[in-house]
Image: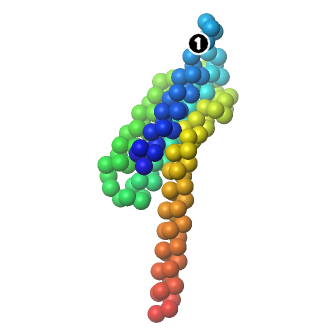
Amino acid sequence: MLILALPGAAWSLYVGLIASAAFFGEQPSPTDHATTTAAVLSGASLWLVTALLTAVVFRRAVVPVLCGLAAVGFAVAAISVQPRAPLSTADSAGWLSAWTPPTSWAIVLWGVVALVLWVYGQSRARRRRAAR
């Protein structure tokens, strides 16, 4: 799971860097800074979802802690950007950047499958208890 989150996190950082880069001598606008912050927060959300999912599915402490630390790192990086415009003005490319790569969707799919299997297991256990 940790490896599946890496491409999305890297892509969110890339989008953030591109959004705040000065092209052709033109300084980034406040909206560009807001998009950079949104991209980094998108990476933080990916790491947070990965941490929660690995904690629930695998019940080991190492990977969720690493993902949680990465989420905190991304959140601190987002705070350090200090957007000069409200985050609501950020481009959707920033908000969705970490969730664009297929590996991020694999994490989401893994979470959905884990949820469906848990619900199925719970309903099956209830039927067994009712049959007794």
User: Does residue 29 lie above or below 2 as drawn?
Assistant: above
x and y percentages locating residue 14 in the rendered image: 52, 27
Q: Quadrant of residue 31?
A: top right
Image point (52%, 73%), residue name = 120
x and y percentages locating residue 36 in the rendered image: 57, 26
Q: Quadrant of residue 98?
A: top right
User: Taking 9 as reference, is 24 left or right?
Assistant: right
> What number of labels is visible?
1
User: Does residue 18 lie above or below 25 as drawn?
Assistant: below
Give the residue number, with chain letter if any, for mark 1: 22
Report if residue 5 is visible in the image.
yes
| Extreme-top residue of the structure | 25
Q: What is the image's colouring?
A: rainbow
Question: Mark 1, residues whose alpha carbon is within 10 Å: few (<14), some, or many (≥20)?
Answer: few
Q: Secondary structure at mark 1?
A: loop
Report if residue 83 is visible in the image.
no
User: Does residue 118 lie above or below 54 as drawn?
Assistant: below
Image point (33%, 55%), residue name = 60
Image point (46%, 48%), residue name = 50
Please state which of residues 120 and 132 is positioned toward the viewer in this rendering: 120
User: Does residue 88 lie above or below 118 as drawn?
Assistant: above
| Extreme-bottom residue of the structure | 132
User: Taking 35 as reference, is 43 left or right?
Assistant: left
Q: Quadrant of residue 85?
A: top right
| Extreme-front residue of the structure | 102
Image point (46%, 28%), residue name = 77
Under mark 1, the amino acid is Ala
x and y percentages locating residue 100 in the rendered image: 59, 40
